[in-house]
Image: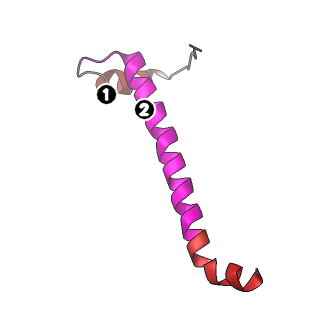
Amino acid sequence: MAGLNPRFTDEELDALHERAADGRSMRACAHDVVVAAMNEHSRLFHEAAQHVLKASAELNRRLA
């Protein structure tokens, strides 16, 4: 498995430590946050693409 060594400011590291306070490691917490952000970005992109396709469906039909 590939690794990554991100750098955090002291404030960011404190926030990560607080977020992981439920017993998870900071590494697991950081992993979950990054994966969630990527999934949300993908979800928003697909939602926007569906909106554009729906909004332009009639025009696309006429141009075909």
Q: Is residue 43 above or below residue 11?
A: below
Q: Is residue 42 above or below residue 60?
A: above
Q: How many marks?
A: 2
In this view, which residue lies farthest toward the bottom? 62
Give how far across and how far down residue 63 sits, in percent.
Answer: 76, 82
Q: CA distance from mark 2 to mark 1?
A: 10 Å
Q: Picture quarter containing residue 20?
A: top left
The amino acid type found where label 1 is placed reads Arg
Give amino acid for label 2: Val
Q: Which mark is residue 31?
A: none
- In the depicted structure, whether residue 44 falls above or below residue 3: below
Where is the N terminus found, in terms of image quarters?
Answer: top right
Residue 22: image location, x then y, percent: 23, 22
Q: Which residue is mark 1?
A: 19
Query: Looking at the image, which is closer to me, 41 or 9?
Result: 41
Residue at 57 percent of width and 15 percent of height: 5
Q: Which residues are magenta?
A: 23-51
Q: Helix, strand or loop at disc 2? A: helix
Report which residue position mark 2 lands on.
Answer: 33
Q: Earlier in the sequence, mark 2 or mark 1?
A: 1
